[in-house]
Image (spheres, rainbow, N blue to C red):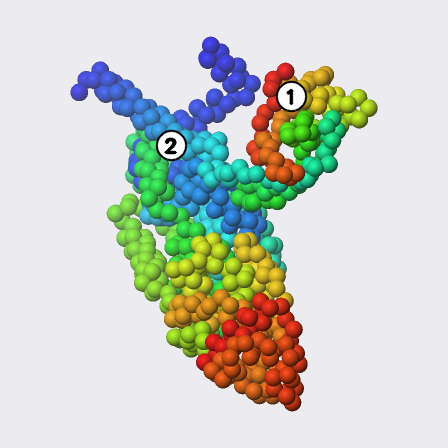
């Protein structure tokens, strides 16, 4: 065997080794990272269906005077069902219609309150203000207040899922 | 461009040079396929670290919660079952690979001078690997985990001289609880990984220092680790990886029922790689037990540790190491034999009970037990529990409880299920103590033979029994053999008296039977009706 073919053989063997090393490690990397990504990124497969939750009596709710109402709800937190206190700012729009805002500012999630003097909702963090209709009056909030879906039965208010407020 | 960045990085950190130095290490020309197992062991350890980390992202390391979060991982997260499968079977793969690695080093005599320290560090690495298996076993917090660990901590408690201290270290004096769990978890995810990584690095440094052991008489020029040996290592790792994948996909990693410290019928079995120890224990009884639990395993580890000093002969060709082959064969046969024996000794099935009240129809039940059925229905036990074909699936089937409980145990459990079975979904039964007793009395007698007959009892009759018990009618009357003979016995009263007579008699006994000492019972109409139904139904 001439040294020429020997070198050729050696280099082709080397190529085979390299292909094997990089190929197999890439294969194993993919076989591991794919399930890992799916495991970390996809939401849990079992989700609770939305249901109507009773918030309370709105018989005495006056128009133009929002009220902070608290209620109990059951939420799935990982592997647990937890019962927690939740809040809604409930405003009467007309005889038949009320809206219930979620209690978080749409800017960075601080809890806002009703500013009685100026008749608007005011967030203490970065002074975003929202009107009775939920629209942004001032400040950095990017969109109107988010609302719960509502259902009224007699004088009882029920809330369901959350609908995002319109972009300003 | 890439070259410039790499050069810059190498100039600042020496990273590229270090990797090159590592990969271009010279190894004997005689090394090849037999030398792949060390790399494999390291790979499987790193794989355990990755899958363990992924599991820990969704795992709550406390009793009860651990079980619930693991169920969440396995049933609700996409890929969760697969990742747990990789971690579970990966542990077994690691044991196998470490064993193969040791067997190879042993047969080749690669532990001999000057590589004694490398070997001894390796033995410690083996013990750490087994420690991972032992501590990880508790973490699913199912019955298998709980009872397996009870046995392990009891063995530790019997260690001559240091048993008490070990018990305190493991916080297992009063059984396995939150503290033991925390310590096992801390060992599994902090102490052991740190020790493993440190010693593994030391192991590799030592291998590099002395070089891979050459075959005797290997005088050929040395070759480089990369790419020839790296390729062989990669192929071996890939084969092992494929086996693990197949195991994780096809075999379900076990998750039994939630740990139940009161389930005395559970027969714990260790993981397969501890089965030989489990079986050996059976050979020694009474005061000799310590021979099986401590002395033999201790001697084995000691011998393994000191092997390089026991066998001081010159490195010999593989064909000349007949004694080593014989020794390995002997050890393998002993371990294999013990393991096979353990596998073949099927655990005796749980003690079966029942039969005492077999075939008893609801009509002959003592009032307390029939009242128990009333509570059973009122508390809607069947919403979660199955009784044979009927009922829910959330809780265990009451006909298939692992063991019979006493009424006292059941009452304690009803009052506070969480206390006796941390993590259980069962809510406390909030009825007064005497009623709990009746409920427990009913559940205790329930078995496959009588369940259908008992549950057939009419609704109002069982409710009547509740009224009967609540008003303590048994203080004066006897019904189905239970109670006191102060007043007339009540069996057959339905044949003697009309329903209306009974109803009126409760309200004003003296009006209908002059001279009777029975006090009036002005109960709600519904209760009186139910009570009457119960009395009329008495045979």
Q: Considering the image in quadrants, where does the N terminus of chain A appear? A: top left
**Few, some or many C-alpha atoms within 10 Å of disc 2 (few <14, some 14-19, many ≥20)?**
some
Asked whether B30 or B101 is in front, the reply is B101
> To which chain does the residue with label 2 belong?
A
| Relative to B339, residue B226 above or below | above
Q: Count the marks: how many?
A: 2
N-term mark: 1 or 2: 2
Q: Which residue was labeled with disc 2?
A: A31
Rendering coords of residue A22 (x, y %) = 35, 25
Q: Quadrant of residue B164?
A: bottom right
Which of the numbered marks, if any, corresponds to residue B112?
none
Q: Residue at x 31, y 23 (%)?
A: A19
Depicted A86 relative to depicted B390: above or below: above
Which residue, as the protein is rendered here, is positioned at the far top?
B1
How many residues crowd around disc 1 within 10 Å: few (fewer than 14), some, or many (20 or more)?
A: many
Question: Which dot, 1 or 2, sits closer to the camera?
Answer: 1
Quadrant hosting residue B359: bottom left
Residue A116 vs residue B200, the one in the foreground: A116
Specify the subunit that label 1 lies on: A
Same chain for marks 1 and 2?
yes
Task: Farthest residue to the bottom: give it.
Answer: B515
Percent across and percent down for residue B439 are: 54, 68
Q: Name the residue: 33% across, 26% down.
A: A23
Q: Which secondary structure, mark 2?
A: helix
Q: Nearer the viewer, residue B489 or B38?
A: B489
Q: Are marks 1 and 2 in contact (CB under 8 Å)?
A: no
Q: Would you say residue B368 is visible in this rendering?
A: no
Residue at label 1? A144
| Residue depicted at x 42% and y 34% | A35
């Amino acid at each position: 065997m001439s040294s020429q073919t020997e070198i050729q053989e050696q280099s082709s063997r080397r190529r085979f080794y390299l292909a094997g090393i990089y190929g197999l490690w890439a294969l194993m990397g993919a076989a591991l990272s794919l399930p890992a990504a799916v495991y970390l990124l996809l939401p849990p497969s079992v989700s609770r269906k939305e249901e109507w939750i009773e918030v309370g009596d709105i018989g005495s709710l006056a128009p133009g005077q929002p009220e902070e109402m608290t209620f109990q709800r059951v939420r799935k937190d990982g592997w647990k069902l937890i019962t927690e206190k939740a809040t809604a700012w409930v405003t009467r729009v007309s005889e038949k219609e009320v809206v219930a805002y979620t209690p978080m500012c749409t800017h960075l999630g601080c809890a806002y309150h009703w500013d009685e003097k100026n008749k608007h909702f005011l967030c203490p963090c970065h002074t975003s203000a929202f009107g009775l209709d939920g629209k942004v009056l001032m400040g950095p909030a990017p969109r109107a207040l988010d609302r719960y879906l509502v259902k009224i039965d007699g004088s009882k208010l029920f809330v369901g899922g959350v609908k995002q407020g319109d972009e300003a | 461009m890439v070259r410039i960045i790499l050069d810059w990085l190498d100039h600042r950190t020496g990273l590229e040079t270090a990797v090159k130095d590592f990969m271009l290490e010279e190894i004997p020309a005689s090394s090849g396929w037999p030398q792949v197992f060390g790399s494999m062991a390291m790979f499987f350890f790193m794989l355990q670290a990755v899958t363990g980390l992924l599991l820990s992202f969704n795992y709550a390391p406390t009793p009860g919660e651990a079980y619930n979060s693991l169920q969440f991982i396995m049933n609700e997260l996409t890929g969760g079952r697969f990742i747990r499968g990789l971690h579970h079977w990966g542990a077994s793969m690691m044991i196998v690979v470490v064993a193969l690695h040791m067997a190879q080093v042993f047969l080749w005599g690669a532990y001999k001078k000057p590589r004694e320290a490398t070997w001894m560090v390796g033995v410690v690495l083996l013990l750490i690997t087994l420690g991972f298996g032992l501590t990880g076993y508790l973490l699913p917090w199912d019955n298998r985990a709980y009872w397996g660990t009870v046995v392990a901590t009891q063995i530790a408690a019997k260690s001559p001289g240091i048993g008490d201290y070990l018990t305190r270290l493991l916080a297992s004096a009063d059984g396995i609880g939150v503290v033991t769990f925390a310590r096992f978890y801390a060992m599994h995810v902090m102490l052991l990984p740190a020790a493993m990584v440190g010693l593994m690095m030391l192991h590799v440094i030592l291998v590099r220092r002395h070089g891979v052991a050459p075959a005797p008489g290997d005088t050929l020029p040395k070759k480089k680790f990369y790419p020839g040996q790296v390729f062989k290592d990669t192929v071996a790792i890939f084969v092992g990886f494929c086996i693990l994948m197949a195991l994780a996909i096809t075999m379900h990693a076990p998750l039994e029922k939630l740990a139940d410290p009161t389930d005395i019928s559970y027969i714990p079995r260790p993981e397969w790689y501890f089965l030989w120890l489990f079986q050996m224990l059976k050979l020694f009884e009474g005061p000799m037990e310590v021979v099986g639990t401590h002395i033999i395993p201790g001697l084995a580890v000691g011998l393994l540790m000191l092997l390089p000093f026991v066998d001081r002969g010159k490195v010999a060709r593989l064909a000349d190491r007949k004694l080593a082959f014989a020794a390995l064969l002997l050890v393998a046969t002993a371990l294999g034999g013990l393991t096979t024996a353990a596998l073949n000794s099927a655990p005796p099935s749980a003690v079966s009970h029942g039969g005492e009240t077999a075939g008893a129809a609801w009509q002959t039940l003592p009032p307390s037990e029939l009242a128990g059925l009333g509570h059973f229905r009122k508390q809607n036990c069947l919403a979660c529990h199955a009784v044979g074909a009927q009922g829910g699936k959330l809780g265990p089937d009451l006909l298939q409880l692992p063991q019979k409980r006493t009424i006292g145990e059941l009452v304690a459990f009803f009052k506070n299920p969480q206390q006796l079975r941390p993590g259980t979904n069962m809510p406390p039964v909030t009825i007064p103590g005497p009623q709990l007793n009746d409920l427990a009395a009913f559940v205790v007698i329930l078995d496959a033979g009588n369940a259908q007959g008992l549950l057939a009892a009419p609704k109002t009759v069982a409710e009547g029994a509740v009224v009967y018990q609540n008003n303590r009618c048994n203080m004066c009357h006897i019904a189905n053999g239970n109670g006191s003979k102060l007043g007339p016995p009540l069996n057959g009263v339905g044949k003697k008296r009309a329903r209306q007579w009974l109803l009126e008699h409760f309200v004003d006994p003296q009006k209908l039977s002059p001279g009777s000492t029975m006090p009036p019972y002005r109960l709600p109409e519904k209760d009186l009706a139910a009570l009457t139904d119960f009395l009329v139904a008495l045979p």
